Amino acid sequence: MFMQRIWLAALVGAFGAIPAYAHHSHEIFDNENVLTLSGTVSSFGWRYPHGELNLLVPENGGQSVAWMLEMGPPNQLERYGWTNHALRAGEEISVVIYPKRDGTHEGAVLAVEFPSGVLMVDEEYWDYVDRHRVRR
């Protein structure tokens, strides 16, 4: 009976790890292609497992397209100077992202640049982002 419980616990743990591994995969993002978008923040979510930034990006013809952008988890964002009030609805910003491979208006944020020129970036992407950032 004891061994059955151990096997059951191991089996449950193994199947529980599969969704966690899949969730944290970045294969859905095209890391060979970098986009720089400028737009207006519609919302900023400070939550686990990932922060979420929703950005309205103007396109030709004056219409805006909503982009849903994934960020790191709050504990990682804090290490790079972020707070839960770092972005507010209505703010104009630029972002450097890896777009989603399927062509939808989604992506993974590498950096955010504020109108003041302040650049908030994950340190591992600094050199890469500096080459792609918006020049004002």
Image (cartoon, rainbow, N blue to C red):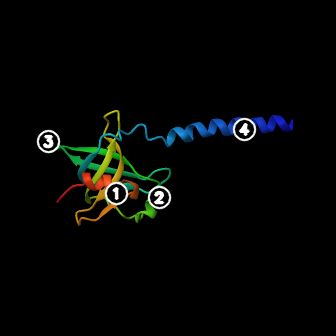
Q: Secondary structure at mark 4?
A: helix
Residue pointed to by mark 1: 126
Residue highlighted by disc 3: 60
Quarter of the view holding residue 35:
top left
The three-letter amino acid code for the residue at tag 1 is: Trp
Per the image, the residue denoted by label 2 is 76
Which callout, 1 or 3, points at the residue further toward the start of the chain? 3
* Residue 27 spot, x, y in % from top left: 43, 37
Residue neighbourhood size for the residue with mark 1, other residues' Cα within 10 Å, grouped as few (<14), some (14–19), many (≥20) = some
What x and y, as percent, mark residue 63? 18, 43
Mark 1 touches mark 2? (CB < 8 Å): no
Mark 4 sits on what residue?
Answer: 10
Q: CA distance from mark 3 to mark 2?
A: 35 Å
**Callouts 3 and 2 close, C-beta under 8 Å:** no
Instruction: Name the N-terminal-most of marks 4 and 3.
Output: 4
Residue 68 drawn above or below residue 28 = below
Residue 77 appears anywhere in the view: yes
Locate residue 41 relative to residue 11 in the image: left or right. left
